[in-house]
Image: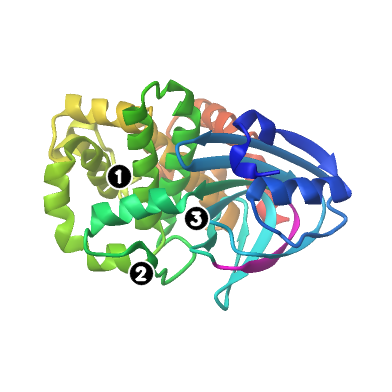
Amino acid sequence: MDARRLAPADFDFEGTGDEARNWLDVAYGSSLGLSGRMGAVRHRRSESDGVAVDRLTIDAPITFDADPMPGLVVVDVRRGQIEYTRNGTTDGGVDGDSLLATGWDMAFSGRGNGYEVDNTRISASVLADAIRDIDPDRRPDELVFARFVPRSAAAGARWRVTVEEYRSSIATHDSDVARGSATRLLAHTLLHTFPNNVVGEASRLDVGRDRRDASQSAVRRAQAFIEGREGDDLSIAVIAQAAGVSPRALQYAFQQHLGCTPLAYLRRVRLDLVRRSLRDGSVVSVADAAVRLGFFNPGRFAAEYRQVFGENPRETLRRAAD
């Protein structure tokens, strides 16, 4: 059974034990070497043009010792704890963290204590196209990651929000051009999130690339401007000016490539960073965390937080304290 020949609906699964182990091997096209009781396993996939975004829940402790997988896989932890070892480097993550689990034919091992994650797999061909966009002289097999975690908390938030908007907007991309553009933006976001030699050595090419790809590069420039200014009072006019386009053009670019408005994207990034501050103990109260990131209406903030994360902010803070 070839996982690449299955339709996305065929990747909806619920099961336990050996049935779940065998099914996951098929779904990910690799021997994952899963051991442990497994518990209840639930899996849902959204897929388009070389990108698959999976919601995976495993409700029991497991270990894994996996063969290489094609492409790159980023794991966003929604609940629980997980640890990955690849290329001699071990990184752990809890809810709100993102980890580059595997890629470019790297084997990996690790363990989890029961968790819910979003796995985003980007094919080698999609990544190769993004690498050529950044540096036409760079071969895809020359890509080397300096670290397997985001270069900053804001970069991690940008990645997670981009993935969520990509997944929610897949069904609205009604043309090959629209789907390809959204996929390419996601690949670029990955390369600008996890430190690597391609982006690090190719910044001199940014200006030329922007001239060739105005609408998508406007989104990237806006994302870069927002990063580190999440708590500032940013208007659409200010963001558009920093991106070098008109407010109308920026609105269109975000709708086309991310399926949301620039200000909706900004609020989602802020919510992600609030969650991180509640979880890591850097704030003393929910109100403190909310105000730091520009949420001054407690009722609206709590409602938005519940809608995105499925729990009240006080629950996140209480779990971190425990």
**Cβ–Cβ below 8 Å for labels 1 and 3?**
no
What residue span does the magenta drawing correspond to?
106-115
Q: Residues within 10 Å of mark 3 (few under 14, many from 20)?
A: many
In the picture, measured across the screen, residue 178 lies left or right of residue 159, that is left
Question: Disc 1 to disc 3, how far (Cα)?
Answer: 24 Å
Q: Residue at x 42, y 41 (%)?
A: 162
Secondary structure, mark 1, is helix
Q: Is residue 86 above or below residue 7?
A: below
* Residue holding disc 2: 142
Secondary structure, mark 2, is helix
Q: Residue at x 87, y 49 (%)?
A: 17
Tell me the colour scheme of the image: rainbow
Q: Position of residue 26 (x, y in %)?
A: 70, 47
The reply to whether residue 162 is in sight is: yes
Q: Position of residue 68 (x, y in %)?
A: 60, 63
Residue 223 is tagged as: 1
For the residue pair 223 and 181, the one nearer the viewer reads as: 181
Question: Disc 3 to disc 2, how far (Cα)?
Answer: 14 Å
Residue 138: say if magenta: no
Q: Is residue 154 above or below residue 148?
A: above
Of marks 2 and 1, the one in the foreground? 2
Q: Residue at x 32, y 36 (%)?
A: 181
For the residue pair 153 and 149, the one nearer the viewer reads as: 149
* Residue holding disc 3: 71
Answer with mark 1 or mark 3, whichever residue precedes in sequence. Answer: 3
Residue 113: say if magenta: yes
How many numbered marks are there? 3
Q: Residues within 10 Å of mark 1 (few under 14, many from 20)?
A: many
| Quadrant occupied by the C terminus | bottom right
Question: Disc 2 to disc 1, how far (Cα)?
Answer: 26 Å
